[in-house]
Amino acid sequence: MLSSLSPKLIEELMILGLVIIPTTAEEISLIVKFTQTHKIDLAVLCGGHGQRGAAQTEGGILIDLQKMRNIIVNAQEKTVSVQGGTRWNDIYPILDAHNLAIVGGICSSVGVGGYTLGGGYGWLTGRHGLALDNLLAAEMILVSGEMVRASKDENEDLFWAIRGAGACFGIVTTFVFRTHAQENLCWLANFVFNGKGEEGGKGKVIKAAIKIINKVLLQNSNGDNACCMRWRLEKDMQEPSIHVMCFHNGSEEGGKEFFKGIMSEDLRDNLVSESMTMMKVGQSGMDTPHTLGMKQILKGASHMPPIRAKFFEDLWDEYLRFLRTSGYMFSYMLWEFHNMSQVLSVGQKETAFPNRGNYGNLMCAATWEPDDGEEMCEQWSRKISHTVREELERTKGEWGENLDEDSKTTVGEYTNYDGLGEGAKFLYGINYDRLVSIKRAYDPGNVFNKFVDLLAEADR
């Protein structure tokens, strides 16, 4: 159909832009070829959670993968093949029926594509590593329209590059993942502290939370424990609350024992804990909050243990100050902490992913109504990121010669959480030069530049 359009009609269509929803890899190939023939801007939408504008175009063509969500499980080989438009909440129930689990999104509505190609932290990261460490192969469309397969045995350089910078090299139509036997139940606790006027209560909660967070990061425990924390204003509340989620890949008794420091009665307003399947855990994460329709800037940073409770108390004070002075009350801060032993079992240069280190990740989400709040929110996001980075460097200095090699060379920020367009040299660190070389081989015209522009700094 596209090939039959007249040049004049193409020009008229591109004034407004066009969204195309393909159903096959062959259709995507034709669309990509068409955009290159007619020099039309190209963007790709997988799950729609991205903050870097990778799924946006003005007067171009947006390929929306929403109808490409087929899932095929090979229970005998413990693998699963999923199409590029799949979301994690599509996958979890299907794997659960086979007593299998996967390193997938804590936020289950996130798409598989951007999550995996940028890294992928999940509840099972402590035991099985990143999502991209469990990627066995990818079928993708290159800028030429060619359909290729990348794996450790096929197009090895491309396979290295897409594990960390995949959106810069083409459109992945199918992912093949390693899955893992998961017959035991897991334990998940949701803990919320609203304060109820208790003097110093939130300071006590922060101290207790930091104690268990340090425990998660420093005590391996087979990678079976993880923790998330979010600060945000809940519906119908006047002040933000502290929300902590504790995960244990094992029994309720084991979970309560590991996290007993945060379980005491005097620290919480509300606690729900239960044993459940990994599928239900995957559907119980910190999903999209009540901010749909608002504007948002994400910015990431990293924390290294031992984390100081006083530093987090100061962050809490800064968070409250921003809410009260800006009025942007739906801004929130979110952390995820996993034991990184399994992540660190893969070297910093073995994939393009540049943030292997004994770190926990911060995602700062400045959120405002559609008005003129962008400048203030951007400034605050940068301020928080800079403050956390200074603390990270201070903590690195404390480790001295005992700091592991990966933590020395890591960039200290999760690429998927950078919504402010940091340069590729910063975001990819020691892997940048090799990425540029591969980029020039597969996409010399820099068509796939919307996630991170790998070539913008290449000749400087």
Image: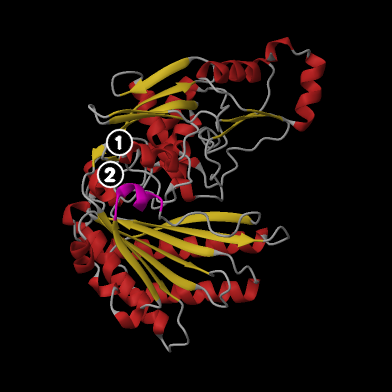
Per the model, the C-alpha gap separating discs 2 and 1 is: 7 Å
Q: Is residue 10 left or right of residue 61?
A: right
Chain part drawn in magenta: 276-283
Any part of residue 306 in sight: no
**Callout 1 amino acid:** Asn
- The coloring applied to the image is secondary structure
Residue 46: give its label.
none
Mark 1 neighbour class, 10 Å CA radius: few under 14, some 14 to 19, many 20 or more: some
Identify the residue position indicated by label 2 in the image: 129
Mark closer to the chain start, 2 or 1: 2
- Tell me the SS state at disc 1: helix
Compared with 450, 357 (above or below) is below
Looking at the rendering, which quadrant does residue 268 occupy? bottom left
Task: Name the residue carrying label 1.
Answer: 134
Majority secondary structure in the magenta region = helix
Q: What residue is rendered at 30% in x and 36% in y? A: 134
Residue type at mark 2: give it.
Gly
Q: What percent of the width, then of the height, locates residue 373?
A: 68, 62
> Does 325 appear in magenta?
no
**Residue contact at pointers 2 and 1, CB within 8 angstroms:** yes
Question: Where does residue 305 sit, x and y in percent of width and height?
Answer: 28, 63
Percent coordinates x, y for residue 434 in the rendering: 39, 31
Q: Is residue 120 above or below residue 62?
A: below
